[in-house]
Amino acid sequence: MAMKIDRNVCTACGDCEPECPTQAIMPFKGVYAIDPEKCTECEGESDNPKCLEVCMEDDCILPA
C-alpha cells in the first residue's frame, strides 16, 4: 500500500519531502505528490509513515 497527498489540503510546505526514506515525495503542480510505486509507508524504517509525523495539516496525507 502507499500513502497519498490530498492536493486540496496540501499547502506545499515541503516538510514531508526530505523525510521520505524512499524519495517517493516530489513537487507536483504547485503542491506535493507521492509516487505509489516508490512509497512503502516507511515499512522497515519507522513504525508510522514519516510523512504523517511531520505533516501539520489534518487529513492531508492518507492511505491510497
Image (cartoon, helix red, strand yellow):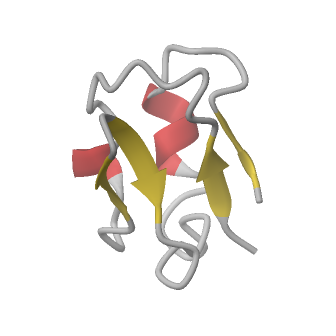
Residue 25 place in picture, x, y as percent: 36, 57
Q: Is residue 60 left or right of residue 55?
A: right
Q: Observer-nearest residue: 62 or 43?
A: 62
As displayed, is residue 59 above or below residue 23? above
Please say whether residue 56 is visible from this viewpoint. Answer: yes
**Quarter holding residue 40:** bottom right
Please say whether residue 48 is visible from this viewpoint. Answer: no
As displayed, is residue 60 above or below residue 40? above
As displayed, is residue 33 above or below residue 40? above
Name the residue furthest bottom. 37
Q: Is residue 59 left or right of residue 19?
A: right
Residue under the point 26% across and 32% down: 14
Residue under the point 59% across and 21% down: 9
As displayed, is residue 25 above or below residue 53? below
Residue under the point 47% across and 81% down: 38
Residue 1 place in picture, x, y as percent: 76, 74
Residue under the point 58% across and 74% down: 36
Quadrant in which the C terminus appears:
bottom right
Residue 19 place in picture, x, y as percent: 31, 48
Residue 5 place in picture, x, y as percent: 58, 43
**Quarter holding residue 20:** bottom left
